[in-house]
Image (spheres, rainbow, N blue to C red):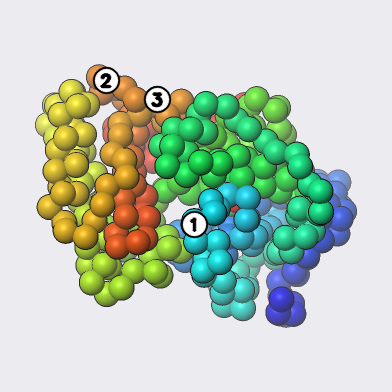
Amino acid sequence: MPTASASIRIIDTPEQMHSLSGEIRSSGRRLGLVPTMGALHEGHLSLMRLARAQCDVVAASIFVNPLQFGPNEDFDKYPRTFESDCHKLEAEKVSLLFAPTTEAMYPPGAKTFVEVGEISDRLDGRSRAGHFRGVATVVTKLFTIVQPDVAFFGQKDAAQVAIIQRLVRDLNLDVRIVVAPIVRESDGLAMSSRNAYLSPQERKQAPVLYRALMRVQKLADQGERNTAKLIASGKAVIAEEPGVRLDYFEIVDPQTLQGVSDLRSGALVAVAAYVGTTRLIDNVLLSGGGEVRTSLR
Ligand code: PAF
């Protein structure tokens, strides 16, 4: 792992991080955490800015968590850009970076996992078995180690957000969750570290996810309330793009991730599709919820 650069302090053991965050909290400063897997893009940086605006000290974490990748997923090829990530964090004046090794996070024999129940089997959880168990376990560990007052997540991972909010509620974790809006490229494609996998041809196809969501939003704005019709219209847009294979297109309650049959305020329209071999996700909250959601405990 590269050495620390001038203005960001890099901490690689849970013990050091825990004691440092204890000092920060006992000095009365408000500590914000932005958990990431690195390969930072504007979406992540918008979270850093939000954290800086709301907290006295901002810690980011970079850890490509093996537990949330399935056996045939992209753990090995997931982009790892530590040096440039550090420069971006410095530019955002993030002062602490927790970047542990896999062995430090999961010592030999680690067999304790966090399961959030059936919500983990909805949306991405249906096609990525065990993914949300991996997310819930690592996020619980990060919260325990870093002890943030506030933690920041992106709305792009809407199912992850619902699971983390449930986890925090069910385990009475002492952290406030702030959710920031999706950051998009100029053609609507949601920013994602996985966009780096797309060939130039696939990159041109990828905004179809956003176009499908916008079709649904437009029909809903025009008064369509039947979710089966709305879903069919979104799927039809995806089908227009050869080379894009739909995983799911659903309209769900954003807290429970259960399908809704009649449109209600704040319903989440969520899509996942393979563009070539790259699985992308995107979503939009239909009017009523607003895009920025903050859990109130
Ligand atoms: O959203 C991500 O990057 C990851 O799922 C998270 C929250 C950092 C946990 O590994």
Residue at x 57%, y 27% (from the top left corner)? 117
Question: What is the CA distance from the residue labelled 1 to the residue labelled 3?
Answer: 25 Å
Q: Quadrant of the N terminus?
A: bottom right
Q: Quadrant of the C terminus?
A: top right
Mark positioned earlier in the residue sequence (1 or 2): 1
In screen coordinates, is 84 left or right of 156? Answer: right
Residue at x 71%, y 48% (from the top left corner)? 142
In screen coordinates, is 81 left or right of 291? Answer: right
Dividing the picture into quadrants, the one containing residue 173 is: top right
**To which residue does mark 1 refer?**
73
**To which residue does mark 2 refer?**
261
Q: Amino acid at mark 3?
A: Gln
Total numbered labels = 3
User: Dot 3, crowdedness within 10 Å: few (<14), some or many (≥20)?
Assistant: some
Dividing the picture into quadrants, the one containing residue 13 is: bottom right
> In what element is the residue under mark 1?
loop
Mark positioned earlier in the residue sequence (1 or 3): 1
Residue at x 54%, y 44% (from the top left corner)? 131
Residue 206 visible at all: yes
Between residues 285 and 140, which one lies in front from this camera angle?
140
Dividing the picture into quadrants, the one containing residue 111 is: top right
List x then y, in percent, for residue 277.
35, 61
List x then y, in percent, for residue 55.
65, 51
User: Dot 2, crowdedness within 10 Å: few (<14), some or many (≥20)?
Assistant: few
**To which residue does mark 3 refer?**
258
Between residues 86 and 48, which one lies in front from this camera angle?
86
Question: What is the CA distance from the residue labelled 1 to the residue labelled 2?
Answer: 32 Å
Is mark 1 in CB contact (under 8 Å) with mark 2?
A: no
> In what element is the residue under mark 3?
loop
> Does 112 sit above or below residue 99?
above
> Does 195 sit above or below residue 253?
below
> In what element is the residue under mark 2?
loop
